[in-house]
Structures are given as C-alpha cells and as structure tokens.
Amino acid sequence: MGVTARAQPNIALIKYWGKRDSNRNLPAVGSISITLLDLYTEMCVEFDSESGHDTLTVNGDDSPALLPRVVRCLDDVLGENRSRARVTSSSNFPIAAGLASSASSFAALVVAASAAAGHERSTAELACLAGRASGSAARSLYGGFVELQNENEAILVDSILDGDAWPLRVVAAVTATEAKPVSSGEAMEISRKSSPFYARWIEEQPMDLATARDAIAVRDFGKLASIAEHNCLKMHSVMWASRPPVVYWNSATVACMQAVRELHESGVGVFFTIDAGPQVKAVCLPDDEARVVDVLSQVAGVEQVLVSGIGTGAELVASE
Ligand code: 2P0
C-alpha cells in the first residue's frame, strides 16, 4: 500500500550554514525560517517485499544520484532490517536549484515512510529524522515562522508564530534552473575548513536569531528586513571567502537584489534573501506583492517568478 505525504520548502530568514557534527548532520547554528504554502513536494512510499533494492523516481524519471540519500533516510526512519521501498517524488517547482527542494523532499519522505510502516511518531521526532537527512528539512515539519534551536546534543524545532498571524508573501525570482555546482552540504564543509569569517559567523548567530525572534514577535517588518538581509549577506561572505570560493550568484541574482533594494528605498515593504543557489526570494507585505512581482519579472535574466504565501507543516495527503 502506498502512502503519500506532502511538504513545502522553507525559506531561512536567519540561515543554517555549517555543521558541528557531520556524521549526525547536526547544524553548527540555529536558524529561523518561513514555511511556504504554494510550492510543494509529494513523496509516495510503497513497500515491495519482492524487491531486493529500493527505487526512486523524481518527477517521472529514475534518479540514481539521489537514491543513496533516500536509502539512508529510510534506514534511519525504519531501521536497516526493513522491506525495500518504491519511492516516488514529484515537486511543482525546480529541484536542486536553491529553492529548498531537499527540505520539502526529506520532510515529506519521513512522514510518508513512518506512516507507511505504521509508526506513530511525534512531529518533533519526525523533525529530528528529517534533519539527519537534510538540516533544513527539520523546519518543514512545522508551519508558519519556525525556529530550529541548536543546543545540547539534539535539535529542537518549533513554530514560533502561525503564518496567519503575519501573512507575509514570498516572491521567488528564478534566475537559473540547472542543478547547483556544489551541494550545500559540501559547501558548508568548505566554509568550515577554510573561511576566515566562519568563526565570526558562528559567534554572531545567537544575536541575529534574537533580533529576528523579537521582530517576529511584534511583527516589525523593518527590523526583520534589516536582520534577514544582513544575515544572508554574511552567510554568502563566509562562502565567498572560502577556498575554493563558493559563489552561487549570477548577474541576474545581483540585479534582483538591486531591484529589491530600490523598491525598499521607495517605500515598498520588501526585503531579499538568497540561499545556496542563484534564486532571489523577496519577502514582502501582502499589499506590495503585485509591485514586487511586476518589478522582478522585468529584471534581465529572470526566467520565472513564483509566488507563495506562508503555509503549514508536512502532512499525509493520501493512502491507496
Ligand atoms: C538554510 N541552506 O538555512 C540554509 C541557507 C542553504 C543556505 O539549509 O547538508 O540542504 O542537507 O543538511 O539543509 C541548505 O542546506 O543541507 C540550507 P544539508 P541543506 O536554509
């Protein structure tokens, strides 16, 4: 019997960058994100007692490259002595291009696999399992504004504000859709080993988290805009100063940042953030969405503009 779960990607406002334990995939810093509503990944898990191996199909094609991570995640969720599984994934947005598809994929996978095996797990347990597969996936188990705390030996994830309580909008300007040259996991390790700014990044993160938490608590858009842009540029500065340098941006990325800055200066409620890819995510007030879409759609090099509200966490969608 196949079990399907759906999860949305999340966009970090205060970023996760760096691991303190790469074997257990524990992050070196806490992070704060918003879970999206309109972009999603569905994962169907179906056990196949006849088969000697797992299979993975992504958007209709076999995906041998991603299979080992999926197998490890299934082993984590179900134990190594398990039936083999047929895993089918579909996303309604470009994957592996800095739109957080690993977050939505692994969040959906742990929910589907756990339910398919009849396990009853709390959201917190599922978040820890998702986080072992992909650090940011832990946040997609929850909706709204989500904080991942990185203290003690485990991660602790929770929603700090419902999306309905502050219904910001996200406009994602897609500037390239090919897979990224270096995975975020590899790039984080390059940063940790070689960036002269890495230690300072880790040291300052609690301050940035506190500022963002305060801004979210009182819905102070200007304060959130300022700390989110600062934290994003600081993370990319860590990457740029690494050896080899890790540069995910293209010229359209920079043009979109400038367009967002100009909008902001003209009084539009908007700020940008950029993850491990060339896409620019503009977070804006609902009344300013149309203007932001209009401006970003016209930036040279922007292939597509995706719009989303803030959504809920991963959940089961169907059993057949
Ligand atoms: C984030 N990113 O907080 C940051 C900002 C990218 C830049 O989390 O190695 O795919 O699988 O734990 O979760 C992307 O990293 O990394 C990410 P792994 P993941 O959203």
Image: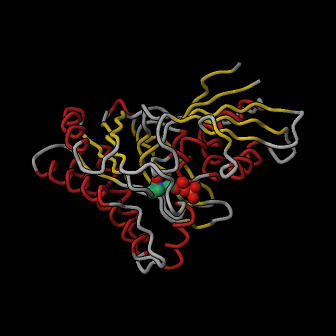
The image position of residue 181, as x and y in percent, is 51, 62
From the viewer's side, name the closer residue of 55 and 167: 55
Residue 79 in sight here: yes
Pinpoint residue 216: horizontal percent, then vertical percent: 32, 45
Count of marks placed on residues: 0
> How far across and down, in percent of the image, does residue 81 sit?
87, 45
Q: Residue at x 34, y 44 (%)?
A: 303
Quadrant in the picture for residue 168: top left
Residue 149 visible in the current orientation: no
Q: Nearer the viewer, residue 298 or 100?
A: 298
Quadrant of the frame with the N terminus? top right
User: Does 247 sit left or right of 63 as displayed?
Assistant: left
Look at the image and name its color scheme.
secondary structure
Relative depth, front residue between 271 and 144: 271
- Does residue 106 sit above or below 202 in this rendering? above
Q: What percent of the width, then of the height, locates residue 297? A: 25, 41
Extreme-left residue of the structure: 266
Horizontal side, residue 76 vs residue 198: left or right: right
- Residue at 53% x, 58% y: name it: 150
Q: Residue at (31%, 36%) from the top-left corner?
A: 169
Q: Quadrant of the C terminus?
A: top right
Q: Is residue 291 above or below residue 131?
A: above
